[in-house]
């Protein structure tokens, strides 16, 4: 197994990558041979039988064995491809019973991963090495598709249904995952950490798959439920909130410096009144913020579309508290 | 009971029979309608091409290069929608087919000339809807309009789906007209076994157009209903199924792939026969494989959906059926190659395009095997590998056939010759530019670069940059091609009736043909490729100086 990428293929990081690549290269070399054979012959004929004065084309005859031959011969080759392809596909779709289950929720434009212990993470998937992992995918809005090239695995996340995929990683390290089904983009750019223009959309639904050993994986699951440590010191709630603002992708719709965006800016938001679409005014207190995060469609701020996804289940109480602390600090 | 004046009119050059804008806009002459289609689709191709160049420019470097993400999404949607619905579907059938089919059949016109004009105006109305959609905010759904994205985006989806809906009717009526024409208006002696392969191909295409396009119409209609009235058929929260849309959509759009490629194959069969001066090897197999593709093409739609959660059984079935389509395509390639053997090959620009077609179609076809094979498709689906694959088939094959076919029949259409040398320069640019643009995309794709990405990881940068430079060469090639046509119109020498010395029936007409195509109804006594039954002198009919120089 080759963990490094080759010219044509990403590194092989899962149990089925070598098989997929074997089929890929088999078709590739068969194609090269056929291509060189057919096109080589065609170009040779073009050169050899160029029109010459006094030489006429030979009338076309019939050659039944030849015609039957090249109609039937490919059938065997194609049947072999079909057979290998289908067997590989069954491997890819049928997960072993003992696989660890991770819930994956897609939404514009981020991925939420829920581990068996209830911990959540955005755009970062940690998995243990050499263990089968089953992903149960769903989508909150449009169709997305979870794609890990190094695993050779891909599956659509469709609203209104669960779909499954599985893999067993064979190599420790960090690789990329992508969204493979087109799902749009924000009309306007958000601001990045250094004030740069950040567009989000289909192309930004990418992240890292971190394959690690059992101990590191278990420690990671413990850690993501609590506040992070920054330079060796446990973060304050506001600092943690600031980090969640980025890691949970709130920044793609909300600015913190008054700049316009898909959602209202968080600057001077907490503690101030806000007007809703029905004309009423409410105070942005902790309860309102909490409701806005868990049930965003309940009250819509005037001048905005009801496009904010719910974070029910994906942010826990302590994380929501941290976000509220952060918003309150933005005065 | 025709008077002497009408007789004269029927026997004048179609370009001169009637002058003024009205004589064009209200014409029932299939040749003029073909020319009007030609002008329209060339404009559509230009517009779609500008979007393509903008997309490639944006992708030159990661991050924002010239446009925002939302603009990029509109640009690739419009590129796809314009190229598919406004350009490639009508390209060979409605433009070249309209002009050539009746002449090839020895008929005065298509079976229903008024219906033909109606098709053209339906096309124009569809185009107006599409342009309206573009200026009123444009669409960002991709040309595939997948739900629920297309039912939830606030871009201008309804007008664009209406455009495709209307364009579909144009396509249906054209198909119907051609089918009846082929059945009813063949000249005496032109029985089915003498039918030119171009006609066989157009006939097969017409069957698909008539049978598949209504499904697209219904699908897009349901989509518009979902947007306007909240109809829940594709909406999971109302008990509908978003994947159902994909089934409906591909039930049309996969056969539509054959609406796009079979005409290309049809043109190439003519080009290879004429410029090898030899009947196509396995004539019957090629004719039947066009019909075969038309039929099997209806049974493979779900191979676009292997990752969409269809059942394992369905995946197995559709993979197997997909491999079945490989056979007629392969047979055609073998036949064309065998035709070259012991021919007398004349490397004109149209023939160069036919060879480019052969090369690129072979690549397009062979890379299809990676996608029909389930295990590898899972990895390659929705990556640049697919983008490269279908560009090799659509652009590398159909567009090459169109470019070659247009130059081949140009003397008949315009009555003038074009400049071979400059045409060869444009061919070289198009060929190199095309392959430079798309060959690297296979590598990008199998390395894991998903399609429809506005931004990308730095590791893909060299490939994207290379592809973009290729697109500039390609663009330049098209500009030179346009120059060749314009130069010919302005100062090209008058074309003889049969500049290529082809045994094809359409070359027995004058260049350009008279309004009634032939002064008297021709009687067909041999096949369209029976070079052994004719002499050069006869074929080059009165202009033997165009024949290959005798020793
Ligand atoms: Cu997505």
Image: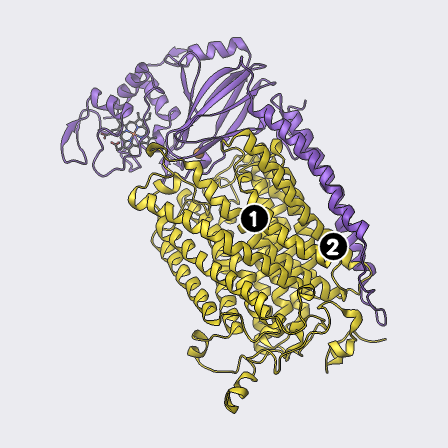
Chain colours: A purple, B yellow
Q: Which mark is residue B468?
A: 1
Q: Residues within 10 Å of mark 2 (few under 14, many from 20)?
A: some
User: Depth check: B190 or B7 in front?
Assistant: B190
Q: Position of residue A286 (x, y in %)?
A: 21, 20
Kindly tell me whether residue B474 is visible in this rendering: yes
**Which quadrant holds the C terminus of chain B?**
bottom right
Asked whether, in this view, residue B216 is left or right of residue A285, the answer is right
- Above or below B45: residue A295: above
- Above or below B359: residue B8: below
Kindly tell me whether residue A201 is visible in this rendering: no
Asked whether, in this view, residue B279 is left or right of residue A297, the answer is right
User: Depth check: B209 or B455 in front?
Assistant: B209
Q: Residue at x 39, y 52 (%)?
A: B160
Q: Residue extending furthest left?
A: A280
Q: Residues within 10 Å of mark 1 (few under 14, many from 20)?
A: many
Instruction: Say which quarter of the image contains residue A284.
Output: top left
* Subunit ID for the residue under disc 2: B
- Above or below B50: residue B388: above
Q: Are marks 2 and 1 on the same chain?
A: yes
Q: Which residue is mark 2?
A: B335
**Labelled pair 2, 1 in contact (Cβ < 8 Å):** no
Q: Residue at x 52, y 20 (%)?
A: A210
* Subunit ID for the residue under disc 1: B
Q: Which mark sits nearer the N-terminus, 2 or 1?
A: 2
Q: Residue at x 41, y 49 (%)?
A: B218
* Between marks 2 and 1 in the image, the one whose residue lies nearer the viewer: 2
Q: Position of residue B415 (x, y in %)?
A: 60, 77
Q: Residue extending furthest bottom?
A: B4
Q: Position of residue B203 (x, y in %)?
A: 59, 60
Instruction: Say which quarter of the image contains residue B299.
Output: top right
């Amino acid at each position: 197994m080759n963990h490094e990428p080759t010219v044509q293929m990403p590194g092989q990081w899962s149990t089925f990558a070598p098989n997929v690549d074997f089929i890929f290269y088999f078709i590739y070399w068969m194609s090269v041979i056929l291509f060189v054979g057919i096109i080589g012959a065609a170009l040779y004929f073009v050169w050899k039988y160029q029109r010459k004065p006094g030489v006429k084309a030979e009338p076309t005859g019939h050659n039944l064995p030849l015609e039957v031959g090249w109609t039937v011969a490919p059938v065997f080759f194609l049947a072999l491809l079909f057979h290998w392809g289908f067997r590989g596909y069954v491997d890819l779709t049928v997960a072993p019973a003992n696989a660890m289950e991770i819930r994956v929720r897609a939404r514009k434009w981020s991925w939420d991963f829920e581990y068996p212990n209830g911990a959540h993470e955005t755009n970062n998937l940690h998995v243990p090495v050499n263990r089968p992992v089953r992903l149960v995918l769903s989508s909150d809005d449009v169709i997305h598709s979870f794609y890990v090239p190094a695993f050779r695995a891909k599956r659509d996340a469709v609203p209104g249904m669960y779909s499954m995929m599985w893999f067993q990683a064979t190599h420790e390290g960090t690789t990329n995952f992508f969204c493979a089904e087109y799902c749009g983009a924000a009309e306007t750019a958000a601001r990045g950490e250094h004030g740069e223009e950040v567009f989000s959309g289909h192309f930004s639904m990418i992240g890292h798959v971190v394959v690690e050993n059992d101990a590191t994986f278990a420690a990671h699951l413990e850690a993501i439920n609590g506040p992070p440590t920054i330079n060796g010191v446990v973060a304050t709630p506001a600092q943690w909130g600031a980090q969640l603002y980025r890691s949970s992708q709130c920044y793609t719709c909300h600015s913190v410096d008054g700049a316009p965006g898909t959602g209202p800016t968080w600057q001077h938001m907490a503690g101030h009144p806000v007007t809703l679409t029905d004309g009423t005014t409410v105070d942005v207190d902790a309860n309102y913020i909490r409701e806005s995060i868990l049930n965003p469609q309940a009250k819509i701020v005037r001048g905005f579309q009801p496009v904010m996804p719910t974070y029910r289940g994906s942010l826990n109480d302590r994380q929501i508290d941290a976000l509220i602390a952060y918003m309150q600090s933005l005065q | 009971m025709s008077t002497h004046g009408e007789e004269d009119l029927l026997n004048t050059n179609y370009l001169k029979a009637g002058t003024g804008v009205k004589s064009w806009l209200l014409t029932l002459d299939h040749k003029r309608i073909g020319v009007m289609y030609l002008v329209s689709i060339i404009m559509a191709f230009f517009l779609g091409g500008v979007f393509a160049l903008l997309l490639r420019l944006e992708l030159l470097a990661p991050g924002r290069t010239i446009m925002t993400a939302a603009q990029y999404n509109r640009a690739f949607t419009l590129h796809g929608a314009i190229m598919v619905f406004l350009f490639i579907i009508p390209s060979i059938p409605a433009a070249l087919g309209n002009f050539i089919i009746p002449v090839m059949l020895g008929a005065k016109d298509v079976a229903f000339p008024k219906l033909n004009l109606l098709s053209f105006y339906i096309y124009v109305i569809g185009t107006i809807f599409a342009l309206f959609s573009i200026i009123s905010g444009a669409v960002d759904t991709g040309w595939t309009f997948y739900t629920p994205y297309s039912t939830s985006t606030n871009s201008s989806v309804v007008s664009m789906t209406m455009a495709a809906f209307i364009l579909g009717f144009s396509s249906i009526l054209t198909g119907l007209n051609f089918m009846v024409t082929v059945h009813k208006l063949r000249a005496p002696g032109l029985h089915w076994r003498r039918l030119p392969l171009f006609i066989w191909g157009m006939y097969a295409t017409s069957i698909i157009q008539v049978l598949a396009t209504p499904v697209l119409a219904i699908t897009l209609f349901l989509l518009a209903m979902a947007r306007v009235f909240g109809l829940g058929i594709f909406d999971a929260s109302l008990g509908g199924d978003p994947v159902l849309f994909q089934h409906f959509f591909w039930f049309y759009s996969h056969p539509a792939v054959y609406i796009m490629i079979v005409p290309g194959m049809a043109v190439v069969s003519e080009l290879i026969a004429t410029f090898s001066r030899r009947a196509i090897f396995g004539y019957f197999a090629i004719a039947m494989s066009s019909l075969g593709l038309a039929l099997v093409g209806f049974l493979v739609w779900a191979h676009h959906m292997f990752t969409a959660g269809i059942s394992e059984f369905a995946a197995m079935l559709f993979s197997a059926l997909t491999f079945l389509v490989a056979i007629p395509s392969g047979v055609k390639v073998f036949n064309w190659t065998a035709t070259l053997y012991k021919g007398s090959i004349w490397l004109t620009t149209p023939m160069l395009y036919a060879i480019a077609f052969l090369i690129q179609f072979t690549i397009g076809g062979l890379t299809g095997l990676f996608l029909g094979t389930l295990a590898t498709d899972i990895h390659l689906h929705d990556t640049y590998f697919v983008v490269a694959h279908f560009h090799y088939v659509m652009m590398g094959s159909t567009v090459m056939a169109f470019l070659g076919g247009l130059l081949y029949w140009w003397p008949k259409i315009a009555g003038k010759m074009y400049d071979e040398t400059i045409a060869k320069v444009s061919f070289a640019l198009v060929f190199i530019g095309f392959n430079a643009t798309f060959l690297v995309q296979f590598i990008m794709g199998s390395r894991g670069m998903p399609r429809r990405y506005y931004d990308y990881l730095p590791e893909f940068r060299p490939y994207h940059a290379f592809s973009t430079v290729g697109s500039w060469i390609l663009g330049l090639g098209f500009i030179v091609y346009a120059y060749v046509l314009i130069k010919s119109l302005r100062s090209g020498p008058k074309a003889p009736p049969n500049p290529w010395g082809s045994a094809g029936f359409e070359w027995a007409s004058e260049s350009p043909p008279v309004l009634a195509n032939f002064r008297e109804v021709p009687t067909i006594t041999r096949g369209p490729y029976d070079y052994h039954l004719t002499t050069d002198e006869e074929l080059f009919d009165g202009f033997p100086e165009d024949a290959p120089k005798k020793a």
